[in-house]
Image: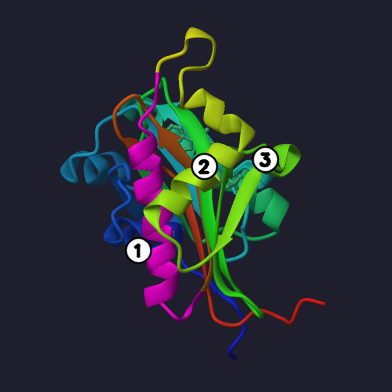
Amino acid sequence: MGGPRKLPEHEALGLVERYGLRVPRHTYVEARGLEGLVERVRGEGLRPPLALKVSDPGVLHKSDVGGVELGVDLGELGERAQVLLERVAQRLGRTPEGLLVQEMAPGGGVEFIVGGLRDGVFGPTVLVGAGGVLVELYGDVSLRVAPFTREEARVMVSEIKASRLLYGYRGMPQRDVEALLDAVMGVQRLLMEEPHVTEVDVNPVIVYEKGALAVDARVILGKGPEKG
Ligand SMILES: Nc1ncnc2c1ncn2[C@@H]1O[C@H](COP(=O)(O)OP(=O)(O)OP(=O)(O)O)[C@@H](O)[C@H]1O
Ligand SMILES: [Mg+2]
């Protein structure tokens, strides 16, 4: 009782969407309910290509357990969903709970992470950095204790090396810095207004020339073990 709990991926995406982050269209299916998957996906108006992701309370990093399939067409949906779930089941030692089916985000964006946690001493603290599956490898992040202004968020973004990718590095197009700032301010507001959320990680937020899309969100509720 009272331990930390991870929100299912579709609920985490729904929560960050309520704080103004744009997310691709998605649906959740139970692992036991895969029959009729194509009809379901069609019925909900999801347009291929699709991303498939394992959704299970025991899986924190989906790629680490082979739980992400990208660029899936309707014709191969059933089979690739099955293969993904079997692969994850092998690693997990049991069938995972379900699957998030999501529209693929367009190419041409740059991946950032926008996250936050409720620090035992400082309270709500927000992070922005170079994102994607290699985020730990880069360690290219900037942190602020809430509350802070949008202008402070702008300084924060400028402090990370990857921000050069937003400002037209080596002839690359300029990206929508304001859309990334919207995500930073949204995550800050989420932490301040949702006291039961102890940790949130939106990774990646894909930033385009116009707009940004949050394709993955991890939200932890409840008090975690004391870190020491
Ligand atoms: N809908 C999508 N459209 C395009 N690319 C996607 C989509 N979903 C995921 N990706 C790509 O796949 C990568 C891994 O996906 P995702 O972040 O959902 O899984 P993860 O392994 O849980 O990530 P984390 O490293 O945050 O634990 C993303 O960084 C992104 O490059
Ligand atoms: Mg991720």
**Res. 46 visible in picture:** yes
Q: Earlier in the sequence, mark 2 or mark 3?
A: 3
Badge 3 is on which residue?
A: 140
Residue at horizontal 30 percent and vertical 34 percent from the top: 211
Q: Position of residue 99 (x, y in %)?
A: 44, 51
**Is residue 68 toward the left or the right of residue 90 in the image?**
left
Quarter of the image for residue 117 reads bottom right
The residue lying furthest to the top in this view is 171
Residue furthest out toward the right: 228
> Magenta residues?
174-197
Of tags 3 and 1, which is closer to the observer?
3
- Disc 1 or disc 2, which is closer to the eye? 2
Q: Amino acid at mark 3?
A: Asp
Secondary element type, mark 3: loop
On screen, residue 213 above or below 144: above
The residue shown at (22%, 41%) is: 39
Look at the picture and state if 25 lies above or below 18. above
The residue carrying mark 1 has its beta carbon less than 8 Å from ligand 2? no
**Residue position for label 2:** 157
Near-viewer residue (25 or 155): 155
State which image quarter holds ligand 2: top right
Residue 107 coordinates in the image, percent (x, y): 40, 22
Whether residue 186 is in magenta: the answer is yes
